[in-house]
Structures are given as C-alpha cells and as structure tokens.
Image (cartoon, coloured by chain):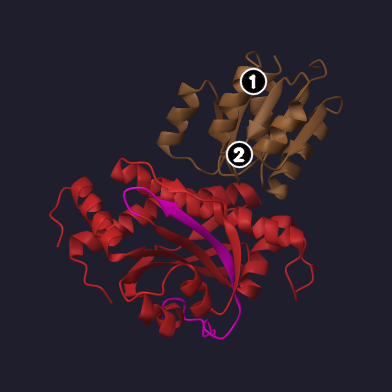
Chain colours: A brown, B red
C-alpha cells in the first residue's frame, strides 16, 4: 500500500473529476483529493499545501492545462504531474514532454488512471 | 454541394476514417462494449443549403431512418477550432438519440426522457469532446500541424439555429458534414459530425490534404 498522498484533480468537466476521484477513492482510500474546475481555482487550492500527484485537463476556461502545469511544476518540482486530455494531438504530447508532464489520453478509464497513479505513487 | 475531385473525396474520407476509428475506439473504452461503426460519408455543402434542410435529407437517405431532423430538437456538442484553418466542429444527434447514448454511458436505462439532467449533459459534452478531439487530432496528424481547440459546449435546438449559431450566417461559409452510424449492443445510434468553415479555411484544408496525399488540389 502506497503511503497516503495528496492528489490534485483539475478538469472543467465535473463528470471527469468524478470519474477520477471515484478511482482514487476506491483504490487509495487514504489519499486526500483536491478538486478544481479551472487553473485559478487550482492555484488557490494548493496554496500552502504539499501536493504529490496532479492530473490536469488541457482545454479549460482561463489558463490551459499546459500553462497550469508550468506554474505547478515551478511550485512543486518533485510532484508527478500529468495531463489527462481528449486532445491527443502529437503537438500536445510533445509540449507535455518538453514541460516534463506526463500524458494520459481520455477517455478516462480505470486502467489508464490506475496505471498512472501506480507509477506516480512509487 | 461543393465539387470535390475523386482524390479529394478519398482524402477527406480517409482523414475522417482515421478520426472515426479513434473516436470509435474511445467510445468503446468509455462504454466498455464493442462499437460497430459504418464507413463515414462526407459531403460539403454551402451553409445556406445546410440550414435549409440538407442535413435532414442526407441523413434520411444515408441511414434509412425517417426522422424529422430539422423539426425535432437536436442535442449535441460544439467545439471551435483554430490553426491553419478555423471553424466550428459539431457533434449532432436527435435529442432522443443523444439520451440513448448518454444512458448507455451512465448505465441509467430508466433516466427521465423529458430532459437532460445536469449529469447527462456533462456526459454528452464529454462524449462530444472525445469524439470531436479524436477527429481533429487525426486531421492534425495528417496535415502535420497543430489545431487549437476551444472548450466544448452543449448545444440544443432546431438544426438551423445550431448551425447559424456556430458561425454560418454567411453564404461564404461551408459545412463539411460527416455522417456516422454506430451500433452498441442493440442500440443503433445515428449522428452527424459537422465542420463549419469559411471558404478560405476550406481551401487551406483541401490544399493540406492534397499535399499530404500527394496530389494537386482541384
């Protein structure tokens, strides 16, 4: 069992957040989950906290997931941060790689999210 | 209807075929079931013609299902895109078909048929987001360029109104319509994907396809 972690889930789709939090709650019941619907909300939410793992949507109102990832990477250099997005273009994958962000394509499935969480919580 | 050379028609169909393959795969993963897809059929029409009801007639001819696409309420998802060419992408279903899809996704066969609940609407937007992104991503791969897309939003209303609100007020704008039919278990769900672009964007799109597939634009 991985030690208890704090995970930040950022997505403007409530359904997507719900799916990810359900997977986390089922497999990692001790983890703390922080949910945000956009980048500004996410940055306010993590203020003064330690966050270990993050999932970020790309297309969101306000700043996009890549811009948010950049800011979060500066604040949390050791955190595991991944884009979780339907935008599966090569250009987005390359930008994620350049920004040292992982990439999980939507649709959200238990297999994909668990694969990321298992690797991220090692 | 806009004239496309045989090469162009093949290229557009192939581009969307790749997109629909990815979309079908994504949908299958979301539903946890096999999704059977028909070969996409593509038409490019002037927006005014589309608004006048060509979507309705084309859909009836293709699917053999006589539904009044123009009079029934349409539900769907719109996503604007920009890049080498720009426009709006729409995923459109007669409302009861969209509900059928959402219920398959949420596994709620008894859900209220009268209206989309908030969660059903969320689910429909997410399905649209994934399907439209799969198509746009496949096209981006083919043209070797990035397509920037905006946040998806739910649309609902008569087809003419939806197309007009997506930017088709001008005679110079065109609708590239892709009819899709897919089957999940016993459910047969028909819908249309429509890409609305101005003439300049359409020309750029055709030129990009011509370059990729190695033939001259008509």
Q: Which residue is rendered at x = 31% and y = 55% of the image? A: B14
| Magenta stretch encompasses residue B168 | no
Q: Position of residue A99 (x, y in %)?
A: 50, 23
Q: Position of residue B91 (x, y in %)?
A: 52, 63
Q: Nearer the viewer, residue A77 or A92?
A: A77
| Magenta stretch encompasses residue B81 | yes
Q: Is residue B44 left or right of residue B111?
A: left
How packed mark 2 is, by other alpha carbons closer than 10 Å (few <14, some 14-19, many 20 or more), is: many
The chain to which mark 1 is attached is A
Q: Which mark is residue A57?
A: 2
Q: Nearer the viewer, residue A97 or B179?
A: A97
How packed mark 1 is, by other alpha carbons closer than 10 Å (few <14, some 14-19, many 20 or more), is: many
Is B195 placed above or below A56 here?
below
Q: Quadrant of residue B20?
A: bottom left
Q: Quadrant of residue A36?
A: top right
Q: Which residue is rendered at x = 16% and y = 48% of the image? A: B214
The quadrant the N terminus of chain B occupies is: bottom left
Q: Is residue B198 left or right of residue B22?
A: left
Q: Is residue B183 left or right of residue A17?
A: left
Question: Element under label 1?
Answer: strand
Please give the residue where the numbered disc 1 appears in the rendered image: A80
Q: Quadrant of residue B176?
A: bottom left
> Can residue A104 be seen by looking at this rendering?
no
The chain to which mark 2 is attached is A
Is B27 placed above or below B104 here?
above
Is B112 placed above or below A75 here?
below
Of the numbered discs 2 and 1, the one sitting upstream in the chain is 2
Look at the image and give the residue range highlighted in magenta.
Answer: B61-85
Q: Are marks 2 and 1 in contact (CB under 8 Å)?
A: no
Whole-angstrom CA distance, mark 2 to mark 1, is 15 Å
């Amino acid at each position: 069992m991985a030690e208890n972690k704090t995970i930040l889930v950022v997505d403007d789709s409530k359904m997507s957040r719900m799916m990810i939090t359900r997977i986390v709650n089922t497999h990692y019941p001790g983890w703390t989950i922080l949910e945000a619907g956009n980048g500004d909300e996410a940055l306010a939410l993590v203020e003064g906290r330690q966050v270990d793992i993050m999932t970020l949507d790309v297309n969101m109102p306000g700043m996009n997931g890549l811009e948010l990832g950049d800011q979060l990477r500066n604040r949390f250099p050791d955190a595991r941060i991944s884009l979780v997005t339907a935008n599966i273009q090569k250009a987005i994958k390359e930008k994620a790689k350049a920004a040292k962000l992982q990439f999980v394509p939507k649709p959200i499935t238990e297999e994909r999210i668990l694969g990321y969480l298992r690797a991220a919580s090692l | 209807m806009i004239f496309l050379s045989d090469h162009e028609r093949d290229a557009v169909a192939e581009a969307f075929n790749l997109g629909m393959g990815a979309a079908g795969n994504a949908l299958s993963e979301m539903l946890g079931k096999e999704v059977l897809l028909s070969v996409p059929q593509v038409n490019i029409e002037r927006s005014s013609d589309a608004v006048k009801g060509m979507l309705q007639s084309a859909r009836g001819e293709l699917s053999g299902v006589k539904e009044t696409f123009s009079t029934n309420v349409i539900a769907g998802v719109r996503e604007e895109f920009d890049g080498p060419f720009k426009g709006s992408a729409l995923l459109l279903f007669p409302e009861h078909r969209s509900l059928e899809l959402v219920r398959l996704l949420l596994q709620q066969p008894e859900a209220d048929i009268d209206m989309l609940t908030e969660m059903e609407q969320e689910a429909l937007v997410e399905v649209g987001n994934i399907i439209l992104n799969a198509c746009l991503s496949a096209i981006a791969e083919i043209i070797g360029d990035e397509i920037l897309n905006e946040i998806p939003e739910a649309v609902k209303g008569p087809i003419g109104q939806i197309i007009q609100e997506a930017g088709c007020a001008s005679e110079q704008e065109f609708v590239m319509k892709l009819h899709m039919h897919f089957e999940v278990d016993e459910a047969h769900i028909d819908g249309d994907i429509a890409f609305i672009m101005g003439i300049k964007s359409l020309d750029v799109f055709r030129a990009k396809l011509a370059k990729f597939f190695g033939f001259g634009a008509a």
